[in-house]
Amino acid sequence: MSVRWFRPVPDAEMAVAGTDLFHAEFGTEPEGIWAAPGRVNLIGEHVDYADGLCLPIALPHSTVAAISSRTDGLIRLRSADGEPWEGRIADIGPGRPTGWAAYPAGVIWALREAGMLAGDFAGVDAVFVSTVPIGAGLSSSAALECSLALALAPDPDRASLAAACVRAENEVALAPTGGMDQAASLRATEGHALLLDSASGAVAQVPFDPASHGLALLVTDTRAPHRLVDGQYAKRRDTVERAARRLGVGSLRELADCGRDGMDAVRALRDGELRHRARHVISEIARVRLAVQALRSGDYAEFGKLLYASHLSLRLDFEVSCPELDNAVECALVTGALGARLTGGGFGGSAIALIPAGRVDEAVATTRTRAANLGLPEPSFAVVAASAPARRLA
Ligand code: GLA
């Protein structure tokens, strides 16, 4: 059987696919087409909701929104991957609608709440086509949100747009995620990782070009069932917030900024679960700082070590890994990867590996064979570069 790859599609072809679906659904041409990418996080996992630092890149895989405005207040949403939804702004609110449409409908609601929707907004027809695999931990929902937000908000301030998308996800789709995914989709740039400081919302662009060092960034979608809304993510977030309260700080970031004293405070926590979760957050924020230094000085060997240290912390202290993710990480490492880790929320989804470009095929073969031997789902793969943020296509 041949290897399963999930491939990006060039913008021009995505625009055609969006136009075709729009035509099939609504019988006319769209007024405009926008695209927004999925993301992988290089490092800084499960720290965005603790005011921490993370370092995602935008993927070459994207969601395209083809759109026309209406004048009768109706909102009609269609996707190549889900049930159609139709309604009005008044039909949108916490938990309404459900399913995939919660994300784009939520964006319309959140933009209006923030006063960012065009003054003359009176309904919209929108179709979505995506190459970001769904449920792979690669932020297909953020790509969906950001493509529509960019299309509908006349204000080009991307930090505010990202904030509105986060509200859509938290308050309408009821997924208690942090803000990393939307920041990556809207604010990352080609050839760079985005250093996001979740405490201030400030970002910096950090050069990320493994290919110029003979390396590839391999993404393995384990195709293990992965659900962010299923309670485990919310539980982790809740535990991290409880640890902060127990330690008398507003967020664990405050302790991460205290050097050794911060970690000493965490060590003194008597509740083992709080101690382990907090240790992950504080050590992970320190690793992001080191990773940025390593990338800025072109030290990919050091960067790789930090990736694997992050994986171990997520597996042992934060307990969000699973056999499928561990398999992808271990197989990459035995094939000569400089580092590898789970990326995104965990409990399934995807892993990344920084690997000599010439050994990608070997790592892929090893991962597939071992997955099959362990009775795990057949993974799917992509080699990715840091790509462009959300943009207008036509
Ligand atoms: C998901 C969330 C993000 C972030 C990651 C873990 O992707 O959407 O906000 O918390 O998990 O780092």
Image (cartoon, grey):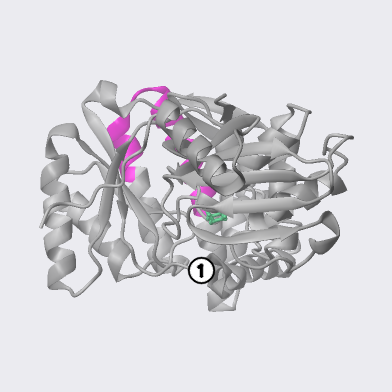
**What is the crowding at mark 1: few (fewer than 14 residues within 10 Å), some, or many (at least 20)?**
many
Q: How many labels does the image show?
A: 1
Residue 34 in the magenta stretch? The answer is no
Relative side of 14 to 365, left or right: right
Image point 54% across, 73% down: which residue? 232
Closest to the observer, 59 or 312:
59
Q: Residue at x 79, y 45 (%)?
A: 123
Residue plotted at (11% across, 62% down): 369
Q: Where is residue 208 in the image (x, y as percent from the top left)?
A: 40, 27
Would you name the residue on which mark 1 appears? 276
Residue 104, percent from left and from top: 66, 51
Residue 22 in which image quadrant: top right
Q: In this view, does 108 lie to the left or right of 211?
A: right
Question: Can I make out residue 322 in this image?
Answer: yes
Q: Residue lying farthest front?
A: 27
Quadrant (top left, top right, bottom left, bottom right) of the N terminus: bottom left
Q: Main secondary structure of the magenta part?
A: helix
For the C terminus, the quadrant is top right
Q: Quadrant of residue 384?
A: top left
Say which residue appears at 84% left-offset and 46% top-offset: 72
Image quarter for ligand 1 equals bottom right
Which stretch is magenta?
283-305
Q: Position of residue 377 (x, y in %)?
A: 25, 68
Give the camera-side residue of 65 and 37.
65
Amino acid on which disc 1 is placed: His
Residue 135 occupies quadrant:
bottom left
